[in-house]
Image (cartoon, rainbow, N blue to C red):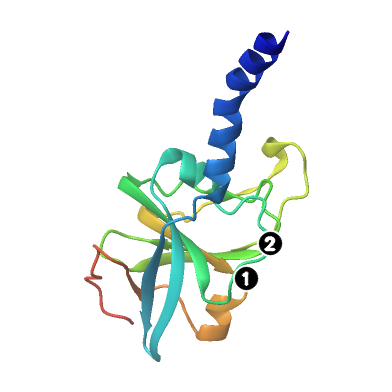
Amino acid sequence: MKRLLVAAILAVAPFTLHSASAAEVPAKRWPLTIATGAGVHEFHAEVAQTSAERSRGLMGRERLAEDGGMLFLYASEQPGRSGFWMYNTLIPLDIAFIDGMGCIVSTHTMVPCGSDAPADCPVTRPGVPYRAALEVRAGTFQALGIRVGDCVAWPGHATRCKPE
C-alpha cells in the first residue's frame, strides 16, 4: 500500500511542479520608449514572443502598473485583419499596433469582454499590417498624447521612424 501511495505521488509530482514553476517564473520585462512630438515616455513591458505567450496575453490580470504593459512581437508582418480580443481580460487596455519601422500605425481602447464564450468577444483589428503590438492601461495614450505616427523602441529594435 505504501509503495502504491508513493507511486501515485511521483506520478502527479511532475504536473504539480511544472504548474507551480510556470506560475512563479516572472515574465521577461523590457524597457520600452515611445517618442512623441512632445517628448519620450518610458515603459517596462512584459514580452510575449511565442504563440502561447501571445495567446495568454494579460488574461486574468486584475491590475497593471502605470508604466507597465505587454509587448507582443511577431517574426513576420501580421495582416490588418488579424487582431486582439479581450476574452478573460479583466482590465481595460489601450493597444498600439506597430509596424516594422517602430511606427505606431493604429491605436484603440479595448474594454473587457464579460462573456464566457470566446466567440462573443469582439476583435480589435488595426486595419493595417503590423509587426508588434503594445498593450497598456486604458487611458494612458490619451493622457500622454501618444498617437498614430509616434515611434516605439525596445531592446534589439531601434526605431527607424520619426515622431510626427
Rendered-image quadrant of the N terminus: top right
> Closest to the observer: 100 or 136?
136
- Looking at the image, which residue is at 42% across and 49% down? 80
Q: Secondary structure at mark 2?
A: loop
Task: Give the image location of residue 40, x and y in percent.
Answer: 37, 85
Task: Give the image location of residue 18, x and y in percent.
Answer: 53, 34
Rendered-image quadrant of the C terminus: bottom left
- Mark number displayed over residue 138: 1
- Mark number displayed over residue 91: 2
Q: Residue furthest bottom?
A: 38
Characterize the local packing of mark 2: few (<14), some (14-19) or many (20 or more) Cα atoms within 10 angstroms: many
- Looking at the image, which residue is at 61% across and 64% down? 93
Which residue type carries mark 2?
Ile
Relative to 149, residue 155 above or below: above
Which residue type carries mark 1?
Ala
Image quadrant assignment for residue 5: top right
Relative to 153, residue 88 above or below: above
- Between discs 1 and 2, the one toward the N terminus: 2
Image quadrant assignment for residue 41: bottom left
Horizontal arrangement in the rendering, residue 90 relative to residue 72 (left or right): right
- Looking at the image, which residue is at 28% across and 66% down? 155
Q: Secondary structure at mark 1?
A: loop
Horizontal arrangement in the rendering, residue 33 relative to residue 139 (left or right): left
In the rendered structure, are the residues bearing label 1 and label 2 in contact, judged by CB atoms less than 8 Å apart? yes
Task: Give the image location of residue 51, x and y in percent.
Answer: 43, 39
Task: Give the image location of residue 42, x and y in percent.
Answer: 42, 79
